Amino acid sequence: MIEQWNIGMMEEKHILKKEQNKMIMEGNLNKDIDYRAEFLKLKKEKNAILLAHFYQISEIQDIADYVGDSLGLAQKALESEAEIIVFAGVHFMAETAKILNPDTKVLLPDLEAGCSLAESCPPLEFGKFKEKYPDHIVISYINCTADIKTMSDVICTSSNAVAIVESFSKDQNIIFAPDKNLGGYVNRITGRNMVLWDGTCEVHDILNTEAVIKLKMDHPDAKLIAHPECKAQLLELADFVGSTTAMLKFTMNDKSKKFIVATETGILHQMRKESPDKKFIIVPTDENCSCNDCPYMKKNTMEKLYLCLDNLLPEITLSDETINKSRLPIDRMLEISKKLNII
Ligand code: 13P
Ligand code: SF4
């Protein structure tokens, strides 16, 4: 018996054998197994690489062949010569890896590692939205499904969004999707008036501006660094706004000894590793809980990494048509980034 999974995509269906899925999701785990060691052994045997985003749990970041932001991960996926890419990130990132390297098997340890931002932009509704603006081009943030990428002219990430927008003339009409916070930030920086799709990241959008003001008063010597997926009120208070890689580099190069960090908690691992003498304070969420752990990023575990590589499931599959159509706007982004030396 098989079970079908559809993570908000129109045409791609991920089919898993029910028994396999049950084992992977519920974890048919043996406490005597050292899953880290077994995964590393399998990785070598099967000629696989592990790509991990900065929001992954520390244990996964520590064994990854590459840890980075969305742009860096896409660039590594493109260059990879491994037979298998195990993607420790979320669904849209693994899809991007498949689009860029279609002959490689791409595995995502937990298919439910989605993204609220990508889910906020269903292709049918986005198609109707686009129809209202026939003279606009579409710039989409990489945090969107492959279907939305097929409907876009160029993709951007938080590393290159400003540069991508500025590569078009001032009089070019633009729709920016799906993150209204990032789009609003780019509008303010570039003086554009892009039409924004109304999507947000459920993690960054609820970071608490009042708490930031209090933290700044309590720690006047600290610099506030923020991811552009945060609300405008918070970004206006920031000393630095950038992608996860840019935030990490800022903490490494800046003379300050203390940073208030407005993003997902996973990035703290690399910040502390790179600058053990510096102090990092994470911005709390509205509910005063630890909701700035992305629930999707944190679905991946060491056990699931091992099980997915052992079973070669769940695998990301896309039709040739989707791969070909979504590749064009990603290639445009990579070309512009290369020209401008953005990595
Ligand atoms: P970057 O790491 O590319 O800045 O993106 C952050 C994010 O939210 C990824 O989902
Ligand atoms: Fe999506 Fe936000 Fe999680 Fe990034 S942090 S994967 S944008 S929900």
Image (cartoon, rainbow, N blue to C red):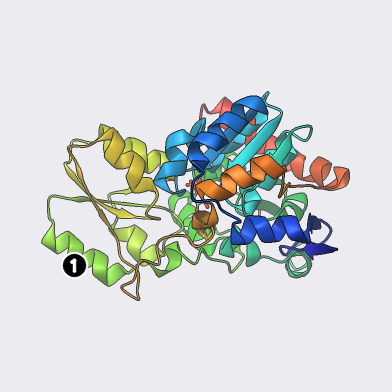
Q: Quadrant of residue 271?
A: top left
Please, is residue 155 above or below residue 238 in the view?
above
Q: Quadrant of residue 155?
A: top right
Q: Is mark 1 within 8 Å of ligand 2?
A: no
Please, is residue 181 above or below residue 279 in the view?
below
Locate residue 222 relative to residue 83 in the image: left or right. Answer: left
Q: Which residue is mark 1?
A: 214
Q: Is residue 215 or residue 309 the one in the foreground?
A: 309
Residue at 24% in and 35% down: 275
Q: Amino acid at mark 1?
A: Lys
Q: Residue furthest top?
A: 81
Q: Position of residue 170 (x, y in %)?
A: 58, 47
Locate residue 135 relative to residue 2 in the image: left or right. Answer: left
Q: Residues within 10 Å of mark 1 (few under 14, many from 20)?
A: few
Q: Is residue 274 or residue 150 the one in the foreground?
A: 274
Residue at 17% in and 41% down: 256
Q: Position of residue 64 (x, y in %)?
A: 50, 34
Q: Position of residue 250 (x, y in %)?
A: 31, 38
Residue at 40% in and 62% down: 292
